[in-house]
Amino acid sequence: MSSLPVISLKGLRSSNLQERLATAAELGHACRDVGFFYVTDHDIPLAVCKGAFDLARQVFALPADDKAAMSIRRSPHNRGYVAMADEKLNPESGADMKEAFNIGTDFPEGHPDVLAGKPFRGVNFWPPIEGWREQALNYFDHCLELGRTIHRGFSLDLGLSEDFFAQHLTLPIATLRMLRYPPTAGSTDREDGGAGTHSDYGNITILATDEVAGLEVLNRKGEWIQAPHVPGAFVCNIGDCLMRWSNDVYVSTPHRVRPPARERYAIAFFLEVNPASVIDPRDVMPDQVPKYEPVTCAEYLAARLNATYDHRQAET
């Protein structure tokens, strides 16, 4: 495969089961063969998407002191600002040349899960920009609903009840991550200097990109192919948690971001499932010998993040 498939999601919203099954089969084919795909007809308004990029530019333009006050180092729940070179998606290659800002589900300080210190149930840091929080949460909510819709397709393709994943997506771990890559082409020999070669950790990633090239995907032949900007579409890929859950029927895919020729922005929505949901291949593929032991989503995600950030390694 030299390019990524483009899949319309209209069929998943049809009242006709056969139309839903047909779209589900397209998703399943992409998840088995490449692990990446574009989605169109996703029902997220263009104005909402453009607005999210405006929010990203605003937060990264803040003074250094404002960004440091929201540092992810101050949150055990994977929220806040990630400074340039603070993350190593591929530790063997070195630090990534990007900065990021993460928000999750918006829990109030008095929420029982927050007070109990449950993993990935913390409060967000909010930039001191009027209206920023409300617009960011609007985009977050749109992406969450899109992720739930795509999971219905996964359920149908895997031969499960159509609402199998719904019970695990009632209050999931979800992270909206805004990313800025400075222009570094020509200043580094690393082909993955923007973001180190890696596979994502969770169930699905929903990515919006600007028009600056950078994202590359490793196909099943071991060839790097570009994932260019497609107007009106999101780039989606499955993560290691869903691969584990499907007993390797779906296979996650390594990808990287090359050093861009000019400033590049991207907005990723990482969707896991509820923290206490048990990821057990026997629930999805009961007729197969399981390749993985059961683990909760929170335990699995924490282990993956601990290997990515130096400050989390120091805490553990």
Image (cartoon, grey):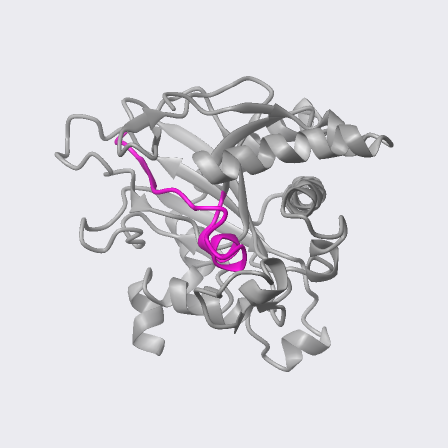
Q: In the image, what residue occupies the spot 33% across and 62% down? A: 309
Residue extending furthest top? 231
Q: Would you say residue 236 is visible in this rendering?
A: no
Residue extending furthest left? 189
Q: Is residue 136 magenta?
A: no
Q: Is residue 208 left or right of residue 68?
A: right
Residue 222 image offset from top left, x and y in percent: 26, 34
Quadrant location of the C terminus?
A: bottom left
Q: Is residue 215 left or right of residue 106?
A: left
Q: In the image, what residue occupies the spot 48% across and 53% down? A: 243
Quadrant location of the N terminus?
A: top left
Q: In the image, what residue occupies the spot 72% across and 43% down? A: 145
Nearest the eye: 263 or 234: 234
Is 169 situated above or below 12? below
Is 288 situated above or below 162? below
Q: Would you say residue 73 is visible in this rendering?
A: yes
For the record, the magenta segment spans 238-259
Residue extending furthest bottom? 116
Q: Is residue 223 left or right of residue 33?
A: left
Residue 80 image offset from top left, x and y in percent: 48, 56
Residue extending furthest front? 287
Q: In the image, what residue occupies the spot 35% across and 27% down? A: 263
For the image, the number of numbered tags is: 0
Nearest the eye: 167 or 53: 167
Residue 75 image offset from top left, x and y in percent: 48, 67
Residue 98 location, quadrant: top left
